[in-house]
């Protein structure tokens, strides 16, 4: 091997190593792209592209080594001569004009293939979503072409153009080029008449006006019917985004009805598509309405929903329904917002309201309605069944992935929940947006915590801090993690921030003490948890929720079952038929071995729960344990 770096570099060039690397890289790229495109049509396993990439990586060093040792010559593959021998050979040989080699052809073909594959990804800007991402959609409306052979309709060539421009100009979401500017440019084209306008000419005019969409249309007549056609076209590629066809009576006094219908359809399509782009990605596929006002209220509702301001969200959703009474998605989110507040009676009413309409819904909305019904009236296993069905239709929906992970968390199946939540975040990353709410992080954090994945949990929260700085729920989970891992200094800092955040949300001192008791409980520090619950009770001794939480801490963790039962009796005096308090009492009696009495109370709790709330897996397991214990006693 040459001793000097310069000589070594020259030797690499002489042995065509760089040429081989370039050919290998280009070929690898083509192979990877082709593999991604053939996996689905050929029903190949999902891991096929990954395997191909691994094999290509493994093959790379071998390609480099072989390119150093061997060379492709007209006489076949031969071992490359040493540099000294090669120079001697070159000294005696006559200079010859360089001939086109097979390798040159291969490189050219590979280069062309790479350009074909790469160009659309880098330079293509031909769909409505991409145009919208630049800001307002800009539009140029061409004069409509009179194709009726009746000159009385000529006036409506510019008439329809003017009406559309006026209508679209009134929208804040659109930028519309004006009639005079458009028609002056058309006159400079020396057109015989407007019928001479071709899509190519319209595209050229539109680009000069820096409009990314143009509207191109015709007026036709068949017997007593007048037909106006219009197309929304990409100015650069001439791709048709949407076509419209409006029919009316072939009488001039009726043309305004046709124009009004066309204006409404074009305007609504453009504005609704603009509004849809403002929705979080998980809402876009089943938020069905043809009313721009309803869509706008729906967006406002989603913003409030993700801020966990459920009353405000419901108010906006109600306004969306007033604008469009058939906006079923808004009804669904009203039901969910009630449920998220624990207002299950109202949530179930709204759920049943849309469930009755399910047979008239598109398949995606129908499946999600079935999921919502399962959430409020059936079991978590039924929820999972419907969500998996939804994922078969759209495996790229982060919302479906999140719900599936959340269902697994509710069943304490954290190992199954983790990949679903991770996929949720990956999908948001893929479209370049942050998750719409903190739960995408905290629910994954819970799954990591319960499986002992503390490092991954900590890393996740660091990322969450960037998207949701100061969120009380995030601070809650960070405090639990710090306490669980013995990071007392960090825990103290988080607690201070957590208390401050709770106070900003108008939490009482008793609520704050109770929340801190829950934090220490989740961290497994029961002595500290008891202290905070005692503090909370000293501040609000008649608060049944605090009493129940404290009682359940003592009972479920076998700290002091007798004291827990005494406490829960006090809560039941304040609210005798509360299913939560009955479940706590029944579980305490079970722990004392009073199985029949425990069973009766747990059954009563369960019946009340299913009538007034939703399925809870922990309560279900309590009842099942009591049933088994009673059955075992009877069999002895």
Image (cartoon, rainbow, N blue to C red):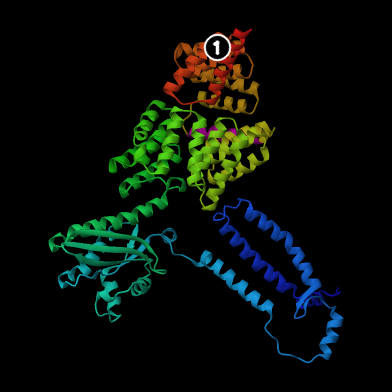
Residue at x 54% of width, y 9% of height: 597
Is 285 inside the magenta-drawn segment? no
Find residue 372 and report its image quarter. Answer: top left
Residue at x 34% of width, y 72% of height: 199
Q: Can you identify the residue that label 1 sits on?
A: 598
Looking at the rendering, in which quadrant would you find the N terminus? bottom right
Q: Main secondary structure of the magenta part?
A: helix
Q: Residues within 10 Å of mark 1 (few under 14, many from 20)?
A: many
Q: Is residue 173 left or right of residue 29?
A: left
Q: Identify the secondary structure beneath mark 1.
A: helix
Q: Position of residue 125 (x, y in %)?
A: 46, 65
Can residue 296 be seen here? The reply is yes
Residue 17's place in the image compared with 601, above or below, is below
Q: Position of residue 349 (x, y in %)?
A: 36, 29
Specify the segment rendered in magenta. 490-504
Find residue 72 and report its image quarter. Answer: bottom right
Q: Is residue 140 left or right of residue 438?
A: left
Find residue 621 and report its image quarter. Answer: top right
């Amino acid at each position: 091997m040459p001793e000097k770096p310069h000589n070594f570099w020259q030797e690499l060039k002489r042995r065509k190593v760089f040429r081989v690397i370039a050919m290998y890289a280009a070929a690898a790229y083509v192979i990877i792209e082709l593999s991604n495109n053939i996996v689905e049509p050929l029903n190949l396993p999902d891991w096929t592209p990954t395997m191909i990439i691994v094999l290509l990586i493994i093959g790379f060093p071998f390609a480099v080594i072989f390119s150093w040792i061997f060379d492709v010559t007209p006489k076949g593959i031969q071992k490359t001569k040493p540099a000294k021998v090669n120079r001697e050979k070159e000294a005696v040989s006559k200079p010859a004009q360089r001939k086109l080699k097979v390798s040159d052809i291969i490189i050219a073909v590979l280069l062309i293939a790479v350009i074909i594959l790469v160009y659309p990804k880098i330079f293509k800007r031909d769909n409505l979503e991409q145009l919208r991402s630049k800001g307002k959609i800009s539009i140029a409306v061409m004069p409509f072409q009179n194709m009726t052979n009746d000159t009385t309709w000529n006036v409506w060539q510019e008439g329809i153009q003017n009406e559309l421009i006026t209508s679209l100009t009134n929208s804040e979401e659109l930028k519309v080029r004006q009639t005079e500017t458009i028609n002056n440019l058309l006159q400079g084209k020396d057109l015989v008449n407007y019928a001479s306008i071709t899509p190519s000419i319209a595209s050229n005019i539109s680009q000069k006006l820096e409009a990314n969409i143009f509207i191109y249309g015709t007026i036709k007549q068949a017997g007593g019917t007048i037909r106006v056609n219009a197309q929304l076209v990409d100015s650069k590629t001439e791709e048709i985004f949407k076509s419209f066809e409006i029919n009316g009576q072939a009488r001039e006094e009726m043309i305004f009805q046709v124009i009004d219908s066309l204006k409404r359809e074009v305007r609504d399509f453009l504005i609704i598509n603009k509004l849809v782009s403002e929705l979080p990605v998980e809402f876009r596929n089943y938020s069905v309405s043809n009313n721009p006002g309803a869509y706008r209220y729906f967006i406002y509702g989603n913003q409030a929903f993700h801020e966990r301001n459920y009353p405000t969200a419901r108010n906006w959703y109600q306004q969306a329904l007033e604008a469009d009474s058939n906006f079923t998605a808004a009804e669904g989110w009203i039901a969910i917002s009630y449920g998220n507040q624990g207002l299950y009676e109202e949530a179930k009413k709204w759920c049943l309201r849309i469930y009755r309409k399910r047979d008239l819904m598109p398949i995606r909305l129908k499946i999600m309605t079935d999921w919502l019904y399962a959430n409020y009236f059936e079991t978590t296993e039924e929820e999972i069944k419907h969500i998996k069905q939804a994922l078969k239709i759209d495996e790229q929906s982060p919302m479906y992935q999140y719900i599936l992970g959340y269902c697994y968390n509710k069943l304490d199946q954290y190992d199954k929940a983790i990949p679903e939540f991770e996929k949720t975040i990956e999908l948001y990353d893929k479209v370049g947006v942050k998750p719409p709410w903190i739960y995408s992080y905290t629910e994954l954090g819970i799954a990591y915590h319960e499986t002992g994945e503390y490092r991954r949990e900590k890393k996740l929260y660091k990322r969450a801090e960037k998207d949701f700085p100061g969120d009380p729920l995030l601070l809650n989970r960070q405090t639990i993690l710090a306490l669980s891992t013995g990071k007392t200094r960090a825990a103290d800092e988080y607690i201070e921030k957590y208390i401050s955040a709770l106070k900003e949300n108008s939490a009482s001192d008793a609520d704050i003490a109770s929340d801190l008791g829950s934090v220490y409980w989740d961290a497994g520090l029961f002595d500290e948890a008891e202290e905070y619950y005692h503090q909370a009770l000293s501040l609000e001794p008649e608060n049944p929720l605090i009493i129940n939480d404290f009682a359940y801490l003592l009972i479920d963790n076998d700290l002091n079952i007798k004291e827990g039962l005494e406490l829960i009796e006090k809560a039941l005096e304040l609210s005798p038929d509360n299913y939560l308090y009955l479940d706590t009492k029944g579980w305490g009696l079970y722990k004392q071995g009073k199985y029949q009495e425990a069973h009766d109370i747990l059954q009563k709790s369960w019946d009340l729960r299913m009538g007034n709330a939703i399925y809870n897996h922990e309560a279900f397991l309590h009842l099942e344990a009591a049933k088994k214990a009673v059955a075992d006693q009877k069999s002895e």
